[in-house]
Image: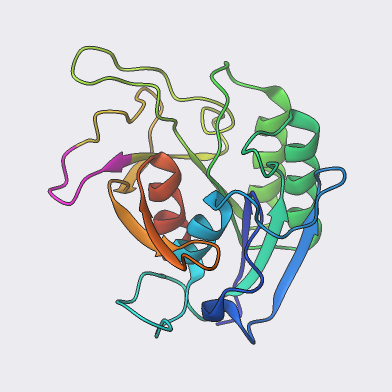
Amino acid sequence: TGIKLCVLDTGIDLNHPDFSGRTIVSASFIPGQTVQDGHSHGTHTAGTAAGPQSPASGPRYGVAYNASLYIGKVLSDGGVGVGGSIIAGMNWALANNCDIISMSLRSPVGVQTSYTQLGQRALNQSSLIIAAAGNDSSRPGTVANTGAPANSPTIMAVAAVDSGCNIASFSNGGKIEIAGPGVDVLSSVPMPTQYGTKSGTSMATPHVSGIA
């Protein structure tokens, strides 16, 4: 309670019963699209980070159920984003003094100065940016490098493990601070489906964000 948790993703299904009556501060940084989630990725990650203690049906899946939820749409309904939208969302979250900023997104590029600077700005104001390492590996043969923004030294990088605490075959490596549950994770998805499972470091990241 009292912690501002921001999820930067594809938005959220504002019509989902598990978020009805919940105060959600939101903004879209995708031209021509509202924060309403037309993809499902954002609703799933937001649900894991801060879904309710008692869902409309099924088992509890959310971590920080009393957190103040901030939703920034930085990825389109097609699930893609550009650096400008992502940076705008990060700036918005920091301007709103969000304590935790969860970013289940990655680009397979090297360290980006802009992300590193925003990560430092966050730390300077006692905020933490947590980001997905990426899903480009094929373990044990190929271990891809952590993508941006998670590869920045000022941002926490999250890998994925399965229910047996084994590293997920797809999970990137290199700069990793922590791992979380990322295989067959149950969470909210847009109506009418309501609930579904997804896998990825994207699913591990909001677990860590909720705990943080």
The image shows a total of numbered marks equal to: 0
Q: Quadrant of residue 145?
A: top left
Task: Specify how the rendered protein is coloured.
Answer: rainbow
In the displayed orientation, state which residue is furthest to the left.
164
Where is residue 136 shown, x and y percent of the image? Answer: 40, 22
In the displayed orientation, state which residue is furthest to the right.
32
Where is residue 66 shown, x and y percent of the image? Answer: 52, 81
User: Residue at coordinates 59% horizontally, 20% vertically from top-left?
Assistant: 111
Name the residue nearer the viewer: 56 or 161.
56
Where is residue 119 shown, x and y percent of the image? Answer: 65, 40
- Does 51 sit above or below residue 132? below
Q: Is residue 114 left or right of residue 56?
A: right
The secondary structure that dominates the magenta segment is loop
User: Residue at coordinates 78% horizontally, 38% vertically from top-left?
Assistant: 85
User: Residue at coordinates 31% horizontally, 41% vertically from top-left?
Assistant: 160
- Does 9 sit above or below residue 152? below
- Does 191 sit above or below residue 77? below
Q: Is residue 20 left or right of residue 27?
A: left
Q: Is residue 56 left or right of residue 66?
A: left
Where is residue 28 shown, x and y percent of the image? Answer: 80, 53
Name the residue nearer the viewer: 104 or 13.
13
Name the residue nearer the viewer: 90 or 121.
90
Quadrant where the N terminus sits is bottom right
Highlighted magenta segment, given as a residue range: 160-166
Q: Is residue 45 magenta?
A: no
User: Residue at coordinates 67% horizontally, 40% vertically from top-left?
Assistant: 120
Name the residue nearer the viewer: 109 or 22.
22
In the displayed orientation, state which residue is furthest to the front.
192
Q: Is residue 211 left or right of residue 91?
A: left
- Does 5 sit above or below residue 154? below
